[in-house]
Image: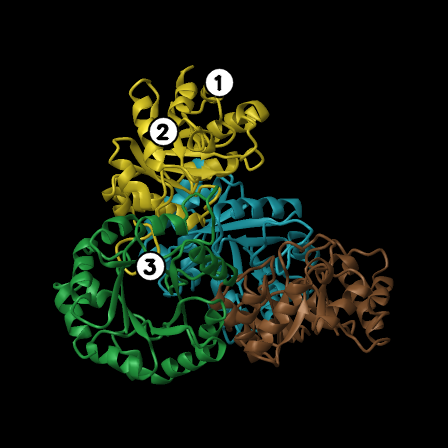
Chain colours: A yellow, B cyan, C brown, D green
Amino acid sequence: MFVLVNLKTYPCDPVAVAEAVRDVDETTDARLAVAPAATHIERVAETGAETWAQHVDPIDHGSNTGHALAEHVADAGAVGTLVNHSERRLKLADIDGTVRAAQRADLETIVCANNPAQIGAAAALGPYAVAVEPPELIGTGTPVSQADPDVVEDAVAAAADVDPDVSVLCGAGISTGDDVVAAGDLGAGGVLLASGVAKADDPKAALEDLVAPL
Amino acid sequence: MFVLVNLKTYPCDPVAVAEAVRDVDETTDARLAVAPAATHIERVAETGAETWAQHVDPIDHGSNTGHALAEHVADAGAVGTLVNHSERRLKLADIDGTVRAAQRADLETIVCANNPAQIGAAAALGPYAVAVEPPELIGTGTPVSQADPDVVEDAVAAAADVDPDVSVLCGAGISTGDDVVAAGDLGAGGVLLASGVAKADDPKAALEDLVAPL
Amino acid sequence: MFVLVNLKTYPCDPVAVAEAVRDVDETTDARLAVAPAATHIERVAETGAETWAQHVDPIDHGSNTGHALAEHVADAGAVGTLVNHSERRLKLADIDGTVRAAQRADLETIVCANNPAQIGAAAALGPYAVAVEPPELIGTGTPVSQADPDVVEDAVAAAADVDPDVSVLCGAGISTGDDVVAAGDLGAGGVLLASGVAKADDPKAALEDLVAPL
Amino acid sequence: MFVLVNLKTYPCDPVAVAEAVRDVDETTDARLAVAPAATHIERVAETGAETWAQHVDPIDHGSNTGHALAEHVADAGAVGTLVNHSERRLKLADIDGTVRAAQRADLETIVCANNPAQIGAAAALGPYAVAVEPPELIGTGTPVSQADPDVVEDAVAAAADVDPDVSVLCGAGISTGDDVVAAGDLGAGGVLLASGVAKADDPKAALEDLVAPL
């Protein structure tokens, strides 16, 4: 299972969370990574934790003020980027352009989407993975696998229909190790986490609990 | 072949073009339709020409100022809508929402996209058809089938891979009847036209020339 | 006082509301108008009610699919347009472009904004009027003049500072004639209304109640 | 005069340009600063050069994936941020929100705009400065002061009308020291530069030439 901790713009210490990600990663078969804000990528990557960007723009070197360039993110130490997160929705043409820009800089991509139909669409763009985030579960604390297991199974089926090589992550409603196991049982290859780890008093303990049942 | 004439915001008489579309439609096996601006849908539909909207928003009845509601467009006489035209690009979630809104009001949808990868993505959303508009051909007068036939064949293949029921239209670089025939030979089920008919001195003659070789 | 009834995409009969606006307008010194969806502008204008668009795009005749052209809206019978409504927020450059496009077609403009600072900014673009819509009051039923009278007075002062010729409307929290009077006492030159009239069982009676104290 | 070098996503060495900015700043009365991409702010600020962000989002700490938080940018060492650059146009409400977010983190703001009317609007939001970038001059190499001096004078007048404390920068068509002097003569308090310095073989020599006539 791939476990990606999205730090968003939470008031957390990104380096401390990254160190927890790095340390717990060494104790488990799961693959752990952390996605800090752009300004923190370099310092987070220096911890040795696997580092992802939260966003990259569909651009190349040139006249682009206030944009995130794939090469900048990669040079700072990131190995992948989230794309089209529910808090940063993109035009279809820009999701495609971002996946291309990321490939150019050897970044993996996880394209987020709302439902199985959009997951199929995202899979058609050839990303490393897709992540299903049902809007009705975001931020509720209800695990997707419990509230609406069909959406995960349908997303897995929709992605497999279009491109069986694309992994499907579960991107909302994950807070315990049992949720992670349940997501895997439904066919997910990983999970996106956020506040449960980033805002925990002890991020390392939170991560250890999450990977314990794996 | 399906031939849809997009009137954009050209300085043309939408009713005159619609009458030409209606009259030429009766003389050919091709299916002809016209897409006027929202303010003109009702008057255009009253001509008896098959009428499409240029855009519909992913909304329902409610507090939406300055939006195009599928039901309004359908009540005014439209039978379908363009979605995600290159001049009105949408977020992936909004393309999906628009296809759902259109289905709710019994409108057909043609989702436009730039390249085969995006065409596959668009097809995964379950529209009536998709239209490939390679940006490098838009407005050039060079027929897509001549400049870059691979893009049409690849788009047809990409859509068929995802959903064989989705028709693929050719959405740029069509100006003659031979272009329409060539698009059909590459697997396209129709074409999007714009200035060649809308800005013609004699729209009816322009349409007759286009459908003559069919 | 200027009273503009925004029909949004409410499930109402736009012609029936327009007839009520027209009839009540003849009985009062207030100026009444109605803003239907684009597809309904022509039929609403034919009632004789003063008709406004809900949105116009910053474009000219040309290659603009799915956009609202100022000339189309004016030809259909509208005399003005809302701009930057809270449900259709625009980029600063596009608000400016829309005000210019509207002027070109002899449409009046009401630019909406959230707070006094933005009202000052909107006034600097030279519209006919600005409308202050504090986000915390939209849709609450609490009259702005009662909940937060300072925001109206501050908006009036901010607009006057920049351009004393620009009228300030009160765009949220108006549902009774007393609210309209209170808005006027705070310096507003009019009000934007929506569901209170558009969704009323008897729109004419609702409008009569609103203008009765004027 | 304030001279801000915008590195955009040019293929330059941001630290080398920052060192040139720092060194030349010590030799002149002009105030020099550099605006790198978000991933480079920390390393650029460590050179001792005055560092600006290219963009900040109108957000607070919280659930905002892929956004630039004012506090992150300030903690990384930036003292200000560009807002609404022509390559990153924002909604009016978001320009206002960004100016507030920047104030919260003690960042100065320069709000860019196209023409005198928008400059007046930008000035009404209370930024540190505004920058006028006539679209017809961006990237042409023609100095704004020579091609269209009225636009600078009109922008200075429009800003002064609204808020005399807001400085006006000249944001397009500056490449020589004479251009900087001419901009100052028209009332500008500074200039935005980009490729002329960022892509120069010797950024330090380019900056020395620019400030020599001051």
Q: Which circle marks residue D68 in the picture?
A: none
Asked if one can make out residue A57 in the rendered structure from this viewpoint, the answer is no
Query: Cα distance, mark 1 to mark 3?
Result: 44 Å
Of residues B155 and D81, the one nearer the viewer is: D81
Q: Chain of mark 1?
A: A
Is residue D197 shown above or below D71?
below
Which residue is pictured at 55% across the width and 60% down the height? C89
Task: Work out which quarter of the rendered image holds the N terminus of chain C and state it.
Answer: bottom right
- Of residues A142 and C105, which is closer to you in this image? A142
Picture quadrant of residue B32: bottom right
Mark 2 and mark 3: span between their CA atoms? 35 Å
Q: Position of residue A38 (x, y in %)?
A: 33, 45
Label 2: which secondary element? loop
Q: Position of residue B150 (x, y in %)?
A: 33, 48
- Parent chain of label 2: A
> Which residue is identified by label 2?
A165
Q: Residues within 10 Å of mark 1 (few under 14, many from 20)?
A: some
Viewer-closest of B129 and B69: B69
Residue at position x 42%, y 24% in the image: A206
Circle nearer the viewer, 2 or 3: 3
Q: Quadrant of residue A160?
A: top left
Relative horizontal placement of residue C37, taking residue B209 as reference (left or right): right
Q: The numbered mark 3 sits on a residue in which chain?
A: A
Tag 1: residue type? Answer: Asp
- Please report whichever mark, 2 or 3, sits nearer to the chain's N-terminal start: 3
> For the point 65% across and 57% down, which residue is it?
B73
Badge 3 local density, few (<14 within 10 Å), some, or many (20+)?
Answer: many
Residue A136, horizontal then vertical, whole percent: 58, 35
Q: Earlier in the sequence, mark 1 or mark 3?
A: 3
Q: What label does residue A65 carry, if any?
A: 3
First in sequence, mark 2 or 1: give its number.
2
Report the residue at 81% width, 62% height from top: C176
